[in-house]
Image (cartoon, rainbow, N blue to C red):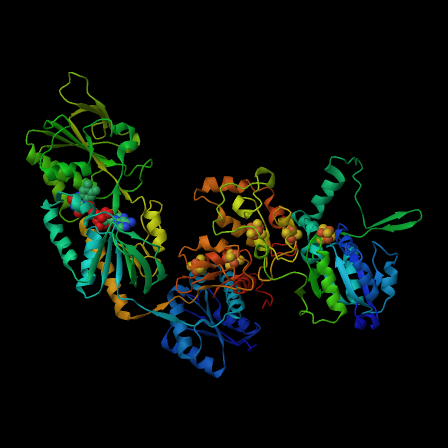
């Protein structure tokens, strides 16, 4: 076995580290650890001269393992790995000890902080001793893209990519494109016709040479990994194999079913309708009650199934503006009607929407507030001789009074919720769901359309409730990400993957179902499990699950982690 | 028997029990008529269960006089420790024989308590005890005739290799007799032995590899059951029926005798060399099988596991990373 020659570099980070940790003393102590050939402290390790010292030491002292004790590896691990590469070393023969965020910044006793730094360095030294070189790998990116969901989000992404000259496969589970958007009459806040906006887009998609649309198809499991996905699809005809490099998930939303809310009587009272049913009436152009009359009293109830711990905790975001949209449309169509908006909070964010609200309040619309915690408005059938069909009883929050509202028609602003089959799509594409079953983005702020699975993007309302503008913005953002990845041609993939030792694997198959990226399969012939390393993200789940220890998580092997722990706990003694 | 082995000088064999149940010694006797093969090539120089050879006789032997010692049982008291050290000195090859010597075994479960707790239970609170004077064993006691002594009871149970260097491990509770004969004959015939420190008489693969039960990747457990609570179909993997089987965390070599007897593996053959702590490994594997995402439900499911510590560490506590339960001592 090669002799391990470890170099340890202790950074002052100006005074950030040096003021709380005795860096000089640490360098001296560290020098005594076995296998440590060189230990230095330096003012700024990440600076050019800092890195140059590291590089020249590697050559001069024939170092083959490096520890830098400095800031968080999130910040500078890539910097030092590059420096190692420049010195001709494999970048994985490196370990960082975080003595800034985890030490100097959070302690006030210099002696203890110094001892802690020593322990952290000892842990890193013990670990790096067992590091193995890992080889970088890259894959060629297939320039085609699969888009799942043909709503406005999927359509927008498809056009963006196809117009840049790249192939798109657009898969829509219903028998028409357009999604929910196709079921809308006008759009808030400017009340333009949705159909006029959507129709030309759908026509462009259908005519585009580079977009293959599959309506109502059956398609098989997606296999493969970023750059090289594969699936089989059938749409009344022979099965077709699809190859693609990226996936955009645009499966949208479904409307909440308000039958489960007893107070609203949906399904029992014929004139209690949902927002989508309202859209249908508006598109047809006549708003009438179940007995064919124009409604005199119309109530619109907000937050149906939203912002309520019993149903969905979140805000569906577009219903307040949509409710105002109805109030305005109805006011124009039925000038003599009484229109009541029963809201819990008015949330009309977005360009032009607050103005839309203040304009509406001048159009003879009565706004009444309720508090979901204190009880929902209750709808009941009015007595026989009453002038209206229904009565709504509610506690009006602003006046503090119990009031009765007559109603001939009630519109429920139902929540937007995740599709029933969101879990299946998540499994199919290897992405995760949040507690509300919306797909989770890679980073909530910095990476909103990517997912933790490389090559899979999420756009539109499948990620969270949003309006058309926001959906389109996301679709175009994901299209840009996809086009960028295609432009790279060869893409680097994870190297810290899992690997099954066939001599140990007993074939129990415990590992298979835990892999969130479906990277493991069972080899029936050899009777062992096999990791597809191109799919593996190195999450480590299978490694900690495997009861035999057959799975090695590269760069996080048992011996590496146990040595690190041992180093941490045995800092006063030698532990390698 | 071949000529070669016949004409060779006989091997000197010793068998000793530390903190043991006696089962390991019986497993050697289980060789039945093969015992004649063994004694044809080996002289038994020390075997407390069968021969009247005193400790003093062992002490009188020259260092390295014994060729092979099978030490079964854990190290629980000063007598076990003394004999382990003595036999190490006197033996060319020292084999940790059986689960107790290998990883601490059943006696090792005492590491979930300490000496004080054990004495309290055994000498005071156990249902069959009347001990008003609170008499407890002491290491030396003066009587008119002189001083009596007893070995010291340690706080910890240790596996053999936590006391002396061990050449080979032959796991099992007790080891499968055929495996013992194979290993023994390999020594006799000078067949190439694996490197020092190896586990012999067992394979690197876990039980599931040999187990004939049908297994899939669908190991989802909503309810943990004891064997008496299911009608075992005799075919489906125990885990897939909700019965804890230590098979995936246990080396094979026993000939999957428990499973073949329609009882899940208890884990006596210990873990493969890639697994430093079979209990922890098995617990993380089991944890992933629990079929629920609801924290309250998960707690309920986990609570169905009878005696988890004893189930997952039945044979391996002292030899695991865990080693023992941490017991707060007053300072
Ligand atoms: C009543 C109502 C009124 C609204 N009014 C407005 C408004 O005035 N202005 C505004 O900006 N926004 C409005 N919205 C919001 C708007 O509808 C959404 O922002 C928009 O529809 C989101 O588009 P999408 O493509 O992300 O999802 P969707 O429109 O839901 O489209 C998703 C598509 O994916 C398909 N799909 C789903 N699952 C699969 C699968 N497994 N395989 C293949 N295909 C699948 C679906 O069939 C559907 O065609 C309103 C919403 C509602 C409910
Ligand atoms: S969990 Fe481990 S032993 Fe079981 S099949 Fe997977 S790799 Fe093999
Ligand atoms: S480390 Fe294991 S569980 Fe995680 S992605 Fe890779 S194969 Fe799957
Ligand atoms: S290993 Fe089993 S049979 Fe052998 S002594 Fe220990 S308990 Fe008894
Ligand atoms: S877990 Fe037990 S029953 Fe299931 S395959 Fe493994 S050894 Fe056989
Ligand atoms: S099946 Fe398990 S418990 Fe039973 S003998 Fe074999 S190793 Fe021991």
Between A355 and A157, the one lying in front of the other is: A157
Q: Position of residue A80 (x, y in %)?
A: 40, 72
**Horizontal placement of A230 versus B25: left or right?**
left
Q: Is residue A462 visible?
A: no
Image height of B251 relative to B242, above or below: below
Q: Position of residue A498 (x, y in %)?
A: 46, 63
Specify the quadrant of the image occupied by residue A160: bottom left
* Residue positioned most to the front: A238
Image height of B47 relative to B297, above or below: below
Image height of B243 relative to A79, above or below: above
Q: Is residue A20 visible?
A: yes
**Horizontal placement of A319 versus A93: left or right?**
left
Q: Position of residue A91 (x, y in %)?
A: 43, 73
Q: Position of residue A139 (x, y in %)?
A: 35, 69
Where, quadrant-wise, is the N terminus of chain B in this rendering? bottom right
Residue found at x 71% / y 45%: B116
* Residue positioned most to the bottom: A60
* Residue positioned most to the right: B145
């Amino acid at each position: 076995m090669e002799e391990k020659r470890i170099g340890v570099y202790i950074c002052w980070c100006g005074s950030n580290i040096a003021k709380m940790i005795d860096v000089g003393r640490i360098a001296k102590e560290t020098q005594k650890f076995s296998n440590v050939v060189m230990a230095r402290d330096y003012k700024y390790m990440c600076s050019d001269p800092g890195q140059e010292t590291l590089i020249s030491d590697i050559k001069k002292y024939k170092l083959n393992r490096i520890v830098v004790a400095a800031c968080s590896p999130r910040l500078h691990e890539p910097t030092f790995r590059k420096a190692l590469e420049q010195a001709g070393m494999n970048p994985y023969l490196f370990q960082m000890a975080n003595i800034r965020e985890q030490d100097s910044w959070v302690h006030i006793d210099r002696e203890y902080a110094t001892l802690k730094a020593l322990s952290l360095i000892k842990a890193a030294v013990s670990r790096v001793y067992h590091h193995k070189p890992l080889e970088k790998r890259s894959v060629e990116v297939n320039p085609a893209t699969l888009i799942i969901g043909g709503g406005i989000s999927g359509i927008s992404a498809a056009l963006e990519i196809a117009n840049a000259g790249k192939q798109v496969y657009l898969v829509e589970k219903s028998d028409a494109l357009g999604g929910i958007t196709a079921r809308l009459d006008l759009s808030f806040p400017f009340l333009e016709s949705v159909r006029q906006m959507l129709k030309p887009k759908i026509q462009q998609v259908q005519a585009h040479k580079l977009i293959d649309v599959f309506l109502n198809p059956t398609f098989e499991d997606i296999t493969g990994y970023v750059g090289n996905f594969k699936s089989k699809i059938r749409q009344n005809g022979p099965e077709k194999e699809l190859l693609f490099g990226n996936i955009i998930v645009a499966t949208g939303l479904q409307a909440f079913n308000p039958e489960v809310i007893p107070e609203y009587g949906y399904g029992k009272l014929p004139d209690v309708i949902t927002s989508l049913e309202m859209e249908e009436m508006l598109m047809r152009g006549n708003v009438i009650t179940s007995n064919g009359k124009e409604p005199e009293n119309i109530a619109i109830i907000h937050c149906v199934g939203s912002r309520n711990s019993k149903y969905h905790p979140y805000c569906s975001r577009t219903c307040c503006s949509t409710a105002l949209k109805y109030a305005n449309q109805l006011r124009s169509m039925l000038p003599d009607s009484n229109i009541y908006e029963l809201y819990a909070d008015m949330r009309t964010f977005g360009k032009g929407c607050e103005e839309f609200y203040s304009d509406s309040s001048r159009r003879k619309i009565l706004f009444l507030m309720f508090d979901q915690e204190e009880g929902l408005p209750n709808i009941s059938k009015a007595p026989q001789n009453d002038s209206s069909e229904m009565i709504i009883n509610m506690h009006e929050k602003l006046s503090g009074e119990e009031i009765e509202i007559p109603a001939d028609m009630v519109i429920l602003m139902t929540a937007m919720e995740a599709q029933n089959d969101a879990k299946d799509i998540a499994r199919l594409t290897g992405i995760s769901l949040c507690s509300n079953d919306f797909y989770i983005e890679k980073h909530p702020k910095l990476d909103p359309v990517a997912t933790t699975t490389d090559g899979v993007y999420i756009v539109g309302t499948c990620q969270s409730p949003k309006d058309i503008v926001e959906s389109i913005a996301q679709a175009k953002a994901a299209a840009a990400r996809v086009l960028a990845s295609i432009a790279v041609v060869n893409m680097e993939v994870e190297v810290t993957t899992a690997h099954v030792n066939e001599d140990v694997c007993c074939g129990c198959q415990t590992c298979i179902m835990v892999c969130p990226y479906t990277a493991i399969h069972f080899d029936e012939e050899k009777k062992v499990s096999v990791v597809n390393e191109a799919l593996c993200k190195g999450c480590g789940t299978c490694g900690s699950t495997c009861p035999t220890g057959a799975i090695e998580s590269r760069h996080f092997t048992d011996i590496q982690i146990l040595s690190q722990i041992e180093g941490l706990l045995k800092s006063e003694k030698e532990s390698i | 028997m071949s000529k070669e082995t016949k004409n060779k000088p006989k091997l000197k064999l010793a068998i000793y029990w530390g903190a043991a149940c006696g089962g390991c010694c019986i497993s050697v006797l289980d060789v039945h008529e093969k015992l004649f093969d063994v004694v044809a090539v080996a002289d038994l120089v020390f075997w407390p269960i069968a021969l009247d050879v005193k400790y003093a006789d062992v002490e009188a032997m020259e260092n390295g006089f014994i060729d092979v010692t099978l030490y079964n049982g854990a190290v629980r008291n000063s007598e076990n420790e003394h004999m382990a050290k003595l036999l190490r000195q006197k033996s060319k090859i020292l084999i940790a024989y059986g689960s107790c010597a290998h990883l601490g075994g059943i006696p090792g479960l005492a590491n979930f308590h300490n000496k004080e707790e054990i004495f309290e239970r055994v000498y005071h609170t156990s249902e069959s005890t009347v001990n008003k004077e609170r008499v407890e064993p002491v290491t030396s006691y003066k009587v008119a005739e002189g001083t009596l002594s007893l070995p010291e009871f340690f706080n910890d149970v240790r596996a053999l290799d936590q006391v002396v260097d061990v050449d080979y491990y032959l796991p099992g509770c007790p080891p499968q007799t055929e495996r013992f004969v194979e290993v023994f004959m390999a020594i006799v015939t000078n067949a190439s032995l694996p490197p020092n420190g190896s586990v012999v008489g067992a394979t690197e693969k876990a039980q599931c590899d040999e187990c004939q039960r049908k297994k899939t990747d669908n190991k989802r457990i909503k309810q943990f059951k004891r064997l008496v609570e299911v009608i075992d179909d005799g075919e489906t993997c125990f885990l897939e029926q909700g019965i804890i089987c230590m098979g995936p965390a246990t080396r094979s070599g026993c000939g999957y005798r428990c499973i073949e007897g329609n009882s899940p593996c208890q884990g006596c053959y210990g873990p493969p060399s890639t697994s430093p702590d079979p209990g922890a490994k098995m617990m993380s594997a089991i944890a992933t099988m629990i079929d629920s995402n609801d924290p309250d439900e998960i707690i309920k499911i986990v609570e169905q596991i009878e005696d988890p510590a004893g189930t997952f560490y039945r044979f391996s506590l002292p030899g695991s990373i865990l080693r023992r339960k941490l017991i707060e001592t007053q300072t």
